[in-house]
Amino acid sequence: MSAYRKELVVFARDGLSAPAVIRNYTAQDFDELIQIQSECFPPPFPSELWWNREQLTEHVTRFPEGAVCVELGGQLAGSMTGLRVHYFPGDPDHTWEEITDNGYIRNHRPDGNTLYIVDISIRPAFRQFGLGKQLMQAMYELVIQLGLDRLLGGGRMPGYHKHARLLTAEQYLDEVIAGRLTDPVVTFLLRCGRTPVKVSAGYLEDEESLGYAALLEWRNPFRPQAP
């Protein structure tokens, strides 16, 4: 499969525009990708949980089509990574570590029916340009190109800890879907066109989400009857 590359103009909330390029990342981008992780997840987030060169090497070797980055004005501004897995509605809950091989994606299945999102990171200085949504669109295009059933991923629910005394995780997700509450991650994913599948308990170690995540998908519109 040929490499992905898309050129576009993006606009900030104040109307400022800038040229952007979405493309597959390569080994030449590794140092900058790790720097982006440090900016997105500063201390006290442990630096050993940022991408490392071994993980990034696995990404571009095992599934280069699922390794995507975005440049803004020639500067690397963010990245998104996926792998192919087998998933069917009703499958048991999984953790992020299990489904992504702790970010190494050595469990990538070339015949998998689902594109699973491992990570999305946008430099804080560039978040006003909607680059995360553009990266998500690139992954939707990959789902269509590969003829997969869906894009799937677990979204943190960092606002949940503020409401956990009154709401279950499922009730919290319902409130966010209804627009009565706003969650920094889940609301963003819903605005990108993702739809809820279920709440997963014990998905990841995250105090703000109390370990919960919202599993959200995007179904391939050209495969409406896919299981």
Image: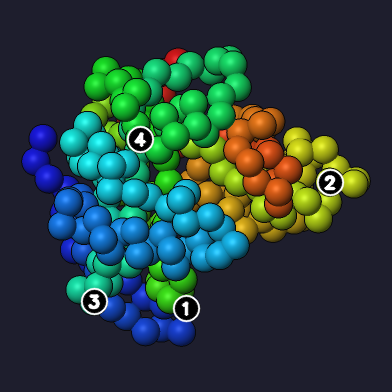
Q: Residue at x 47, y 78 (%)?
A: 13
The residue tagged with tag 1: helix, strand or loop?
loop
* C-beta proximity under 8 Å, tags 3 and 1: no
Instruction: Check residue 13 in the rendering and tell me which mark sits there, or answer none.
Output: 1
Q: Amino acid at mark 3?
A: Gly
Q: Amino acid at mark 2?
A: Ala
Mark nearer the viewer, 2 or 1 = 2
Q: Quadrant of residue 18?
A: bottom left
Comparing 25 with 178, the one in front is 25
Q: Which residue is mark 2?
A: 164
> From where the camera sits, is residue 221 visible?
no
Which comes before the other along the chain, label 2 or label 1? 1
Give the CA separation, mark 1 to mark 4: 35 Å
Q: Residues within 10 Å of mark 1 (few under 14, many from 20)?
A: few
- 212 in relation to 207, above or below: above
Q: Residue at x 26, y 26 (%)?
A: 147
Q: Residue at x 56, y 29 (%)?
A: 95
Give the CA separation, mark 3 to mark 1: 17 Å
Q: Residues within 10 Å of mark 4 (few under 14, many from 20)?
A: many
In the rendered view, does 12 fall on the left or right side of 200?
left
The residue tagged with tag 4: helix, strand or loop?
loop
Q: Quadrant of residue 216?
A: top right
| Residue at the limit of the structure toward the right, as seen here | 166
Give the CA separation, mark 2 to mark 3: 42 Å
Give the CA separation, mark 2 to mark 4: 32 Å
Q: Residue at x 55, y 15 (%)?
A: 91
Q: Residues within 10 Å of mark 2 (few under 14, many from 20)?
A: some
In the rendered view, does 203 fall on the left or right side of 82?
right
Q: Amino acid at mark 1?
A: Arg
